[in-house]
Amino acid sequence: MTAGAPAACVIGWPVAHSRSPLIHRYWLETHGIAGDYRHEAVAPEDFASFLADLGARGYVGANVTIPHKEAALALSEPDDHACSIGAANTLWLDHGRLRSTNTDVEGFIDNLDASTPGWDRGLAKAVVLGAGGSALAVVDGLVRRGIPQVQVANRTSERAEAVRDRFGTAVQVARWDELDAVLSGAGLLVNTTSLGMAGGPGLAVDLGLLRPDAVVADLVYVPLETALLAQAKVRGLRVADGLGMLLYQAVRGFSLWFGVKPAVTAELRALVERDLAGN
Ligand code: NAP
């Protein structure tokens, strides 16, 4: 790296699994920017002092991953997106002020727009499975887009109720043990649970109950094509995968740190796909 060139990092505990360096280094190279992007493994008890020294460490900003997203919100000046989700995943120094946002919302929506254009045209009912951190971003995005009915079903119903209480009347709690009734007539299904991840339990849903023109999105990206997405394709439904969201959520951070809005290209996608396949 050139001395004085801008650098950013991803802060987590653990953090080695993060693909963010691969994505941002690809964009740095593509745009001929003499910057850098690194992993930073920071324990929870060291997070506040790490952030306090972010600029002194040579960073213009950072991504934040588990378990630091809530602390990042509390220790920075969050924007509207980070506040409505209650967690920040992107930080940047703005004339000495540490500001933050959450880019999972735009990552989810931009990926849907790119992968399944027109997905929201006439969409009356969306179903979101799960009520964890990523579900908050998905529901926020759907509500902001004006989807009139967003039904949230979660194994632990109290968490679904908390999502509803956060986002208001467009959001309704649906029963996890009555998914057939919930899915019936839905035009969008989004899996935000960890079900379907490689090596873990699967997600059993009957996609035949969805509208024939429905879109199915899965946030899980290991495997790249989950059983849910494979089943949707067999039925002729359009799909948006978790890798797409991962790539689109990275765009804003790069723009903020390095001053160029990068593109999510087929070449970048193939690069990350190869990396995922190797692990
Ligand atoms: P999280 O906050 O830990 O939430 C996990 C969710 O999965 C909860 O709703 C949980 O239900 C549910 N769940 C877990 N095991 C279950 C089981 N056996 N049966 C039913 N439900 C179960 O995690 P998260 O941050 O939201 O992440 C969820 C998934 O999204 C992960 O696979 C993650 O890798 C992926 N993700 C992808 C992106 C992307 O850019 N593509 C971004 C963020 C997350 P309970 O509340 O009942 O425990």
Image (spheres, grey):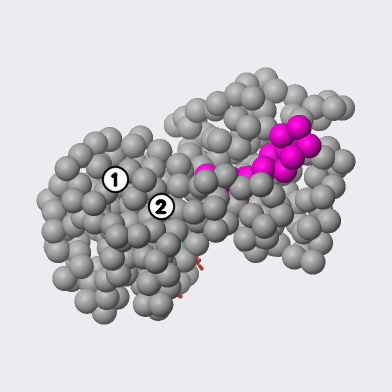
The stretch drawn in magenta includes residue 94: yes
Q: Position of residue 35 (x, y in %)?
A: 74, 29
The stretch drawn in magenta includes residue 143: no
Residue furthest to the top: 32
Residue nearer the viewer, 136 or 164 = 164
Residue drawn at x 45%, y 47% is: 105
Whether residue 224 appears in this view of the structure is: no
Q: Position of residue 244 (x, y in %)?
A: 43, 43
Q: Quadrant of the N terminus?
A: top right
The boundaries of the magenta stretch are 89-103
Q: Secondary structure at mark 1?
A: loop
Whether residue 85 appears in this view of the structure is: yes
Residue drawn at x 77%, y 59% is: 47
Q: Position of residue 159 (x, y in %)?
A: 43, 73
Numbered circles on residues, count: 2
Q: Quadrant of the C terminus?
A: bottom right
**Amino acid tagged 2:** Asp
Q: Residues within 10 Å of mark 1 (few under 14, many from 20)?
A: some
Residue 97 lies left or right of residue 123; in this view the side is right
Write down the quadrant of residue 24 in the picture. top right
Position of residue 169 relative to residue 278, above or below, is below
Write down the quadrant of residue 183 in the picture. bottom left
Dot 2 corresponds to which residue?
A: 140
Q: Position of residue 17 (x, y in %)?
A: 63, 56
